[in-house]
Image (cartoon, rainbow, N blue to C red):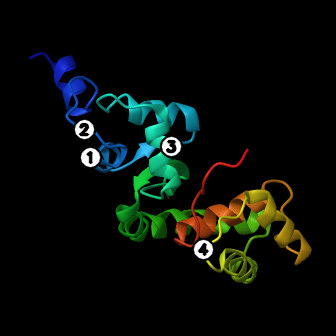
Amino acid sequence: MDLAQRRLRNQYINSSPLEDPVEVVRALCAVQAQDYYASLWAVGLRLRGAQEADVERALNERRIVRTWPMRGTLHFIAAEDVRWLLALLAPRVLQRQTARLRREFAIDRPVLRRARKIVEKALCGGQAVTRSSLYERFDAEGISTERQRGLHILWWLAHEGLICCGPRAG
């Protein structure tokens, strides 16, 4: 078997034995999911007889999580792997971004503590909340979300394991 064929086999692209989207994500550890539709395709490509709906169902059932575990890039991760991956990878990512977030976006520990309380209250009872709804809550409490500041706050809270991307709305 030549090198190209081995790579295709090892990446589960040809003759995949995997039948569940979670199996694919777990086997690869994570699947880059910055481009949502391309990531659905990347998982589905590695499944036997899968439909797009199978991958989306795994996401909606929270068996696969879309969050920022590494490199500041969204990835799909098997739900049971999220905590240990964040514990392993997030501290270094956050340490490297702390000064930049403070300098460019005025995001510091007090802002993050306030934002955390707002998000915890919004999620009370296991409710899914949209990004725009969280931004409205931040703005109402005096935490500006302008100039991508809101996104960076949510990014930080995701690295702390508080939030992840929920079911798609709209």
Mark 1–mark 4 Cα distance, whole angstroms, equals 28 Å
Q: Earlier in the sequence, mark 3 or mark 2?
A: 2
Most extreme residue toward the left is 1
Q: Earlier in the sequence, mark 3 or mark 4?
A: 3
Q: Quadrant of the C terminus?
A: top right
Local SS, label 2: loop
Amino acid type, residue under disc 3 in the picture: Glu
Q: Which residue is under mark 4? A: 126
Mark 3–mark 2 Cα distance, whole angstroms, equals 16 Å
Amino acid type, residue under disc 4 in the picture: Gly
Q: Which mark is residue 27?
A: 1
Q: Residue at (73%, 59%) from the top-left corner? A: 130
Q: Which residue is under mark 3? A: 56
Mark 2–mark 4 Cα distance, whole angstroms, equals 31 Å
Q: Residue at (70%, 66%) from the top-left corner? A: 153
Amino acid type, residue under disc 1 in the picture: Ala
